[in-house]
Image (cartoon, grey):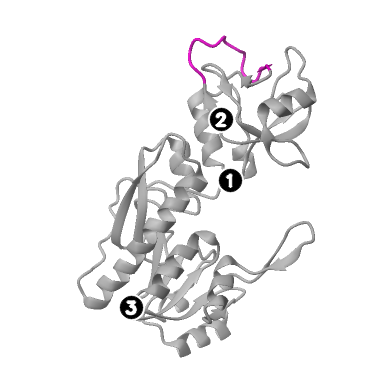
Amino acid sequence: MRVVFAGTPDVALPSLRALVASAHDVAAVVTRPDARAGRGRTLVPSAVRVVAEERGIEVLTPQHPRDEDFQEHLRALAPDVCPVVAYGALLPPSALAIPAHGWINLHFSLLPAWRGAAPVQRAIMAGDAVTGASTFRIEAGLDTGPVFGTMTESIRPTDTAGDLLDRLAQAGAGLLVATLDGIEDGSLHPRPQPGDGVSLAPKLTPAEAEVVWTRPAFAIDRQVRGCTPEPGAWTTFRGQRLGLGPLSTVAPDVATLPPGRLLADKKSVLVGSASGPVLLGSVQPPGKKPMAAADWARGVRIDVGEELGS
């Protein structure tokens, strides 16, 4: 089929590459406009734009897909279907109606669970044991369209959101290509999502990434892993923000510490929680790169009784 692919960040690249390598014809890609990044606030193209241009594929960067010029151009391209992976903009009904087979989204959850922008992060934070990916036809509702196919993936005890998303992006690329194959030969038909089991996954805010040390250790562990790498878990120390990398829960025989209380030695840094201490991994002080927690503790010289988050 003739396809126009829509996607923006790195997580969309496995699908773009799989489509280019497939029997389908990638006529163009749609991606978000160049965005300012870094200290110099220079304009940086999206990951999808970079790869598409390397392969000589036409790139469309509308400010919004409701733009009339964009929709006119898309009609001229005459795509049979528009596969989507993390494009980052809402598609109006007028755009949804252009391809004959619609816009087919690869979403990183087992729908109807975790509809929204942060399905992987929310699944980890909720303590789910299994997640996956789904392909579905986009309609007006938020991730409510009929599903073509799914795949499952176990959530490992040490998975960060970045780890899990990388695996889902790689495996999901095959699911997306197989979905288009099935649509083309008529062997695959979408089924409505069930009414039960719906959960929502709105984008994580920086406030949600602040660790509350009065929570149990297992909940803090899930929160930090779910917020890694974005938006990044954090706490405060001596009134300044301190970034937190993945940490470890500690065996029950370790001495109890009040929530937030620090206990450091030459090799480790413990922090109290509601159910026992956790062992810090890496931390990131303001204006510095991430470092081992023990190195940070030696530099700041933690006083007896000092706490995080106070």
Find residue 186 and report its image quarter: bottom left
The x and y percentages for residue 247 are 56, 30
230, above or below 264, in the image: below
Q: Are marks 2 and 3 in contact (CB under 8 Å)?
A: no
Distance Cα–Cα, label 2 vs label 1: 13 Å
Find residue 228 and report its image quarter: top right
Q: Seen from this angle, which residue lies furthest bottom?
A: 76
Q: Residue at x 62, y 20 (%)?
A: 271
For label 1, count other residues whose C-alpha is less than 10 Å away and answer few (under 14), some (14-19) or many (20+): some
| For marks 2 and 3 on the same chain, the one whose residue lies earlier in the sequence | 3
Is residue 231 found left or right of 91 in the rendered image?
Answer: right
What residue does disc 1 label? 229
Q: Seen from this angle, which residue lies furthest left?
A: 187
The x and y percentages for residue 200 are 44, 48
**Quarter of the picture holding the N terminus:** bottom left
| Residue range of the region highlighted in magenta in the rendering | 250-265
3 or 126: nearer the viewer: 3
Distance Cα–Cα, label 2 vs label 3: 44 Å
What residue does disc 3 label? 23
184, above or below 77, in the image: above
Q: Specify the amino acid type for callout 2.
A: Leu
Task: Give me the disc on residue 247.
Answer: 2
Magenta segment, prevailing SS (helix, strand or loop): loop
- Label 2: state its secondary structure: loop
Distance Cα–Cα, label 3 vs label 1: 35 Å
Please state which of the two labelled residues, at mark 3 or mark 1, is closer to the viewer.
Answer: 3
Q: Specify the amino acid type for callout 3.
A: Ala
